[in-house]
Image (spheres, rainbow, N blue to C red):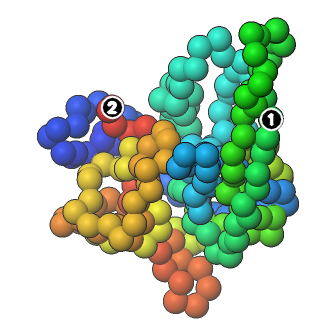
Amino acid sequence: MAKKSGRRSSSVPEKTVQVKEKKYAYRIGIELEDYLFFASMEKGKVAETASLLHNYALAYAMGWVDSLYFNEMQSPQYEQQLQPLNEQGVYVYPAVPVHISHRMMQYNTTDEAFLMKRTQSMGYPNWGFIKCIRPGSTFETYILSHDPIQIPSKIRLGKWMSLASITMQEVSLTKKKGNACPHMVNIQDIACLPVYFSAMYNVLPTRLVQGVEWDEQLDGYQISYGDHQNVWVPESAFWWWDK
């Protein structure tokens, strides 16, 4: 069963996205086996890796999205490439850290290029510091789907294509309205902008927020597992709204 997108702030152009009802839920554990780096924030010569995993990155890492290895122009096509997942009724939320630690590394190199060519001067190499996430760090998130799915036991993440292992546990899912979500959500993927959040992360290509509350009841799902472990999440779809 599909439904059209709901209400959004009047300052945001509306488009129609078909959102399939989710019937299955999976609790996902992710453990890094390599150092992980992606530039979520750059402060001068220091590039920092945020303590999270963006849900778009996870969708690509799972092998759900077809994308070209080489693009002549750097022009992201998230909306077009992620839309088939909406049609299939598959969605993954951003992953939050369970146990995490960082390490500062220094690099000193010339700029990377696919084509080597002689330049006027090589006297100023590219150098700086990278704050990356250590191996052994763990994250957790949820995948909702219309049909049963299988996911790989290993994926690669970040600019270094770092290896990570995945565990999956099927959990109970119930349709339920709610107005508070403790888990991280993607602002681009939800039907209504929140009135409160405890943390916001300005990471490309979209903003992520955690500890979210709304002033009205929204469509969503209650995920249940273990003893008294209940998490409510809002109905979400990849790239639900135009910028």
Cα separation between marks 1 and 2: 39 Å
Q: Which residue in the structure is indicated by mark 2?
A: 242
Q: Amino acid at mark 2?
A: Asp
Q: Within 10 angstroms of label 2, few (less than 14), some, or many (20 or more) residues?
A: few
Is residue 191 found left or right of 77 in the rendered image? left
Q: Which residue in the structure is indicated by mark 1?
A: 109
Residue found at x 18% / y 66% = 215
Residue found at x 55% / y 46% = 44
Q: Which SS class for mark 1?
A: strand
> Residue 21's x, y, as percent?
45, 50
Residue found at x 50% / y 41% = 204
Quadrant location of the C terminus? top left
Q: In this rendering, which labeled residue sits more in front, label 1 or label 2?
A: 1
Residue found at x 59% / y 14% = 73
Residue 218 found in image quarter: bottom left
Q: Which SS class for mark 2?
A: loop
Q: Within 10 angstroms of label 1, few (less than 14), some, or many (20 or more) residues?
A: few
